[in-house]
Image (cartoon, rainbow, N blue to C red):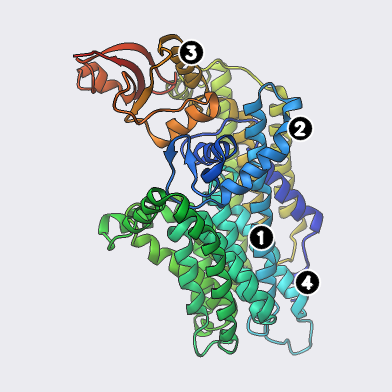
């Protein structure tokens, strides 16, 4: 049994983490909606200053939801690093885009460190230890905890649903990181209640300042349930006073000046937070349970297995703590009007931790089956990504090429040889990993997670190298924003203003980021930028079709439905 607790090389874990976070973080535009909205609030805080640091805005639009924390951290990174980065980039905005993603290293580092150390603290406790063998040979507590921590780290990296979200300039990577920090803090309180309670208070306040009640409430509800009266943490319940006092103090340090600076913003923020909750509805519940299996793959089956296998030990900290962090996000999202990936993300960390504790209960045959599934699944996906790229470049196979061409109309196909080189290296690394797993037959209990983590990272690497130019073309608003800026320079007079009609938050943020385009709320504006659909324009049902003059019309070349029109209203 001791051979099963052999630890992974630290250099391997470091390499996995670096490839994971670096791939797809740079060399692309911000995409709508959350990605570009986060960047827009950072740029507004830097450009406007004043109360926009307390009350996040997108230009003149009050972005009264979530919290200001990612705006503070991102704006600081832009202020600090973009002057240096601009020496190597063509424009200031490109430097700002790169600098705005530096906080993702903080969030990812906090996530992985918290998951590893939290799992280690739980894994070395007596409850999850294997039974002593008649003739000895069982692992010691430290090695066993380290093995489980390695597995949990690989499992969080292997979680499909968060891979893209961890590369966004949004609140999602931050809220995942702070939930992981809360998990670590609770595990720390088992042995060091003082430091654990202080860290927990910081984590809860940071979650609130990141995502408001939607992000903080599931974590805040989980904490008191963890300290139940028969559990091992009950003796340390008095330290929750320190946690609550610190959390409330940090929140009020923002809320009181924010309330004084912007009553309208804070009222809107309260309205958004309260109206986001509702009674559970069947349709919403079915949608959640439809989406969660793919979002939490491959950890959710192992997490359920852990709960079943440890059902007689549910009150043990290594099961009860992650279980509460898993249950309450699910309960809260069932009471939300429109739960989606940002809410699903709060289930990733506890599912990965529970999945790690299922590994010692698996028979060798099951582990081998999981490995073969990972080999077949990710090998097929790798081949599919390469085949699609070949079809994009050469037009063969014809049907695949035709389907891709419909989604990338107007895209000028080209080959980036450095990116292809990275993709080839990643593919060869996948084959080497598979060969190592099949030939070396490692005894470590983490062996069932290596192929899943490696396969997902290789798949992600292929997507962001081979397909990033096409994805950027399809999802970026840089081109249409530049066309709109030229149209405004041509048609807007010295004393005229432009207001928006039907323009979404992501589109508004994109125009602000790429060309510093802002819109007025004045009803006296004679110019209107309208976002509508091609069908409405064709049928003549779009607003102002009969009462305005179309000065400019544009869209993203790959977009078949969305269309923008600059309209001058006719005076009566």
Where residue 458 appears, as percent x and y from the top left, is 65, 42
Q: Are marks 4 and 3 in contact (CB under 8 Å)?
A: no
Horizontal side of residue 391 vs 465, given as left or right: left
Give the distance between the C-alpha atoms of the residues marked 2 and 1, in whole angstroms.
Answer: 33 Å
Q: Which mark is first along the chain, 1 or 2?
A: 2
Residue assigned mark 4: 3
Q: 414 or 544, which is in the foreground?
A: 544
Disc 3, SS = helix
Q: Are marks 2 and 1 in contact (CB under 8 Å)?
A: no
> Can residue 404 be seen in the rendering of this structure?
yes
Give the distance between the C-alpha atoms of the residues marked 1 and 4, in whole angstroms.
Answer: 20 Å
Taking the spot 49% from the left edge, 81% from the top edge, the residue there is 311
Residue assigned mark 2: 84
Residue 546 vertical placement versus 39 (above, below): above
Q: Which mark is residue 486?
A: 3
Q: Are marks 1 and 4 in contact (CB under 8 Å)?
A: no
Give the distance between the C-alpha atoms of the residues marked 3 and 2, in whole angstroms.
Answer: 29 Å
State the quadrant of the C terminus. top left
Q: Which mark is first along the chain, 4 or 1?
A: 4
Disc 4, SS = helix
Query: Label 1: how many residues lie within 10 Å, few (<14), some (14-19) or many (20+)?
Result: many
Query: Which picture quadrant has residue 368?
Result: bottom right
Foreground label between 4 and 3 = 3
Residue 504 vertical placement versus 200 (above, below): above
Residue assigned mark 1: 153
Q: 73 or 431, which is in the foreground?
A: 73
Give the distance between the C-alpha atoms of the residues marked 4 and 3, in whole angstroms.
Answer: 67 Å
């Amino acid at each position: 049994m001791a051979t099963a607790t052999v630890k992974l090389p630290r250099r391997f874990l470091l390499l996995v983490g670096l490839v994971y976070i670096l791939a797809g973080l740079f060399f692309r535009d911000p995409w709508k909606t959350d990605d570009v909205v986060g960047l827009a609030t950072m740029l507004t805080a830097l450009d406007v200053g004043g109360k926009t640091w307390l009350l996040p805005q997108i230009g003149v639009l009050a972005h009264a939801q979530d919290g200001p924390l990612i705006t503070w951290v991102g704006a600081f990174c832009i202020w600090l690093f973009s002057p240096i980065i601009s020496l190597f980039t063509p424009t200031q905005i490109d430097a700002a885009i790169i600098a705005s993603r530096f906080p993702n290293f903080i969030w990812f580092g906090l996530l992985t460190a918290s998951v590893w150390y939290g799992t280690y603290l739980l894994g070395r406790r007596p409850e999850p230890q294997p039974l002593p063998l008649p003739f000895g040979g069982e692992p010691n507590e430290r090695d066993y905890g380290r093995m489980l921590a390695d597995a949990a780290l690989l499992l969080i990296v292997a979680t499909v649903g968060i891979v893209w979200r961890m590369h966004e300039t949004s609140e999602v990577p931050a809220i995942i990181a702070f939930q992981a920090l809360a998990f670590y803090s609770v595990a720390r309180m088992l042995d060091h209640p003082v430091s654990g309670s202080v860290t927990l208070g910081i984590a809860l306040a940071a979650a609130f300042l990141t995502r408001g009640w939607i992000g903080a409430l599931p974590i805040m509800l989980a904490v008191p349930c963890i300290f139940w009266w028969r559990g091992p943490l009950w003796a340390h319940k008095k330290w929750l006073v320190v946690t609550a006092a610190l959390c409330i103090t940090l929140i009020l340090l923002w809320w009181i000046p924010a309330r004084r600076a912007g009553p309208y913003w804070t009222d809107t923020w309260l309205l958004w937070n309260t109206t986001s909750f509702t009674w559970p509805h069947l349709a919403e519940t079915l949608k959640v349970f439809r989406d969660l299996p793919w979002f939490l793959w491959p950890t959710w089956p192992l997490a359920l297995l852990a709960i079943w296998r440890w059902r007689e030990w549910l009150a043990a900290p290594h099961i009860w703590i992650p279980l509460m962090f898993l249950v309450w996000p699910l309960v809260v999202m069932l009471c939300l009007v429109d739960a989606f990936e940002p809410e699903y993300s709060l289930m990733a960390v506890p599912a990965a931790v529970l999945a790690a504790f299922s590994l010692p209960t698996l028979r060798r045959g099951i582990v081998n089956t999981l490995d073969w599934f990972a080999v077949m699944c990710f090998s097929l996906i790798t081949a599919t990504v390469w085949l699609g790229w070949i079809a994009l470049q050469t037009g063969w196979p014809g049907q695949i090429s035709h389907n891709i061409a419909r989604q990338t109309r107007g895209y000028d196909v080209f080959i980036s040889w450095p990116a292809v080189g990275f993709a080839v290296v990643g593919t060869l690394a996948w084959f080497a990993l598979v060969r190592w797993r099949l030939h070396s037959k490692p005894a470590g209990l983490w062996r069932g997670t290596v192929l899943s983590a490696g396969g997902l990272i290789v798949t992600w690497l292929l997507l962001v190298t081979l397909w990033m130019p096409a994805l950027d073309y399809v999802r970026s608003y840089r081109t249409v924003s530049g066309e709109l800026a030229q149209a405004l320079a041509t048609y807007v007079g010295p004393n005229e203003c432009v207001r928006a009609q039907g323009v979404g938050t992501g589109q508004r943020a994109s125009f602000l980021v790429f060309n510093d385009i802002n819109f007025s709320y004045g009803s006296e504006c004679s110019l209107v930028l309208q976002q509508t659909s091609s069908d409405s324009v064709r049928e003549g049902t779009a607003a102002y079709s009969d009462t305005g003059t179309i000065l400019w019309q544009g869209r993203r070349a790959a977009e078949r439905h969305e269309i923008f029109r600059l309209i001058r209203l006719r005076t009566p």
